[in-house]
Image: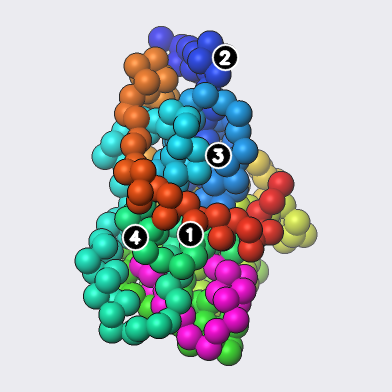
């Protein structure tokens, strides 16, 4: 079966768009309308006039698209595609965290559930987290679930105390400074590009820290020829494809988010054909979470294309 042609035909018939995160299997780009980081994909979801959005990504991304477009059908090809970090905090845990630090605004990373977003003040992504926290103009913020991103933001701003929840992305958090130093030694004269979900000490060694799209744009605009990539393999695969004249190295083999790799072209074809699996969000939760997301979109200009 030629899934690429099948998906293209169904997309036209059903007025559907495919949004794909850059950690997806690289062949998915052949049928994707938009490929990028969380912020870019949220913006594309918010402005599409398609009737159906297929999210080639993980659950919180599809849920965010549904919150932004409650009248559209939003499909996730595989319901098992969750995010380990988003699952580290539920509503009760958020309430406990907030009750320990009353009257401090809560900033939630977009990698969180709709319920968690519904009780936070503002959302952020890896590409606008610094700008979002700064926009609050307060001396202290709560930041969840990612402690690494939160601490990185604190370091960038210098004048805001960021009180972090104890969550992280296991894939990024497991990158060690020893592995980074070894990769640098093996590949001299390379630039290290890291995602801010990496531990503070890893980010501190990087020449550039940014979102997945930020890392790809850095390579695009750099005269450098050699790069070590400290994020999920999907970014490395796309860079190798797009810049064959440059050299890219991974920190280690198999830097893979298993959930992100669940979606295949066959799953996307079946998802579009059968209109499965539809994402639904309770309308009260959705309205509250929308405020949190919209507040971010109003503040943030980063990632606008
Ligand atoms: P980006 O917003 O940088 O694409 O990151 C999403 C993510 O899940 C990183 O692990
Ligand atoms: Fe979640 Fe980490 Fe996978 Fe990103 S890479 S989706 S933060 S588990």
Is ligand 1 less than 8 Å from the beta carbon at label 3? no
Q: Earlier in the sequence, mark 3 or mark 2?
A: 2
Residue denoted by label 4:
116
Q: Earlier in the sequence, mark 3 or mark 4?
A: 3
**Would you say residue 131 sits in the magenta stretch?**
yes
Residue denoted by label 2:
12
- Cα distance in 3D space between marks 1 and 3: 16 Å
Is ligand 1 less than 8 Å from the beta carbon at label 1? no
Decide which of 198, 284 is in the foreground and name it: 284
Judge depth for marks 1 and 2 and give the one in front: 1
Judge depth for marks 1 and 3 and give the one in front: 1
Instruction: Mark yes or no: residue 37 visible.
Output: no
Query: Who's the residue at 42% across and 55% down the image?
Result: 288
Query: Who's the residue at 48% across and 85% down the image?
Result: 140
Residue denoted by label 1:
292
Q: Which mark is residue 45?
A: 3
Callouts 3 and 4 close, C-beta under 8 Å = no
- Cα distance in 3D space between marks 4 and 1: 10 Å
Secondary structure category for the residue under label 2: helix
């Amino acid at each position: 079966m030629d899934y690429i042609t099948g998906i293209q035909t169904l997309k036209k018939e059903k007025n559907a768009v495919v949004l794909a995160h850059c950690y997806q299997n690289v062949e998915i780009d052949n049928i994707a309308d938009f490929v990028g980081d969380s912020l870019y994909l949220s913006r594309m979801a918010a402005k599409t006039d398609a009737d159906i959005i297929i999210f080639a990504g993980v659950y919180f991304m599809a849920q965010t698209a549904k919150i932004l477009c409650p009248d559209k059908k939003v499909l996730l090809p595989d319901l098992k595609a969750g995010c380990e970090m988003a699952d580290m905090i539920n509503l009760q845990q958020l309430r406990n965290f907030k009750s320990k630090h009353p009257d401090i605004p809560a900033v939630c990373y977009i990698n969180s559930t709709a319920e968690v977003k519904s009780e936070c003040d503002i959302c952020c992504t890896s590409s606008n987290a610094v700008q979002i926290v700064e926009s609050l103009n307060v001396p202290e913020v709560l930041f969840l679930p990612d402690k690494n991103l939160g601490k990185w933001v604190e370091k960038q701003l210098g004048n805001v105390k960021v009180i972090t929840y104890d969550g992280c992305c296991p894939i990024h958090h497991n990158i060690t400074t020893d592995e980074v130093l070894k990769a640098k030694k093996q590949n001299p004269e390379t630039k290290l590009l890291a995602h801010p979900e990496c531990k503070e000490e890893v980010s501190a060694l990087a020449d550039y820290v940014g979102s997945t799209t930020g890392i790809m744009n850095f390579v695009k605009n750099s005269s450098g020829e050699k790069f070590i990539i400290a994020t999920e393999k999907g970014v490395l695969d796309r860079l190798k494809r797009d810049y064959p004249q440059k050299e890219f190295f991974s920190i280690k083999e198999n830097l893979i988010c298993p959930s992100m790799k669940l979606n295949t072209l066959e799953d996307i074809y079946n998802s579009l054909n059968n209109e499965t699996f539809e994402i639904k969000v309770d309308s009260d939760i959705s309205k509250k979470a929308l405020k949190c997301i919209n507040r971010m979109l109003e503040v943030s200009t980063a990632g606008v294309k």
